[in-house]
Amino acid sequence: MGNNPDDTLSALKSDVSKWRSTQHNELEKLRLSDRYRKEFVANVTHELKTPIFTIQGYIHSLLDGAINDHEVNMIFLEKAAKNVERMSSLLADLEIITQLETGVLKFEMEVF
């Protein structure tokens, strides 16, 4: 007794349909992941640009003569230092995200 060609064709169509559906779902997940990654990079870029431009403005002002005004130069240096801390915090967050993505760091659930 051989296999019925209609049953074989029907099984093949079913398998191809399941494969197609799985591939479509995987492709949609990849597209969504890519969109989130692009948005994330754009947000990080914006968050880093702000303190960099602020620091740059303070440094250029100091170089253009504000360094000679003790009150102004201290204010600018303090604000620049705060922005450096902001950038350090952002970079530390990025490092943690990278460690979570690569599996180096794992979440540990705790009840509190």
Image: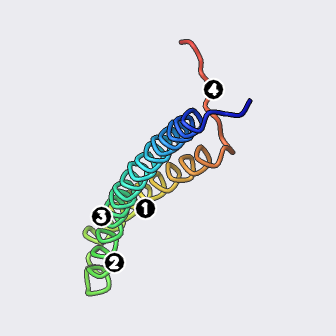
Q: Is residue 101 above or below residue 88?
A: above
Residues packed near mark 4 inside 10 Å, few (<14), some (14 to 19) or many (20 plus): few
Residue receiving disc 3? 50
What's the distance in space between the residues labelled 2 and 3, CA to CA?
14 Å
Q: Amino acid at mark 3?
A: Thr
Residue toward you, 39 or 51: 39
Residue 108 - label: 4
Neighbour class for label 1 at 10 Å: few (<14), some, many (≥20)?
Answer: some
Would you name the residue on which mark 2 appears?
A: 59
Mark 4 or mark 3, earlier in chain: 3
Task: Tell which tag, 1 or 4, sits nearer the viewer.
Answer: 4
Q: Position of residue 27 (x, y in %)?
A: 45, 50
Q: Type of residue at label 2?
A: Ile
Q: Is residue 86 above or below residue 109?
A: below
Which residue position is annotated with label 1? 84
Q: Tag on residue 58?
A: none
* Disc 3, SS: helix
Q: CA distance from mark 4 to mark 3?
A: 33 Å
Q: Secondary structure at mark 4?
A: loop
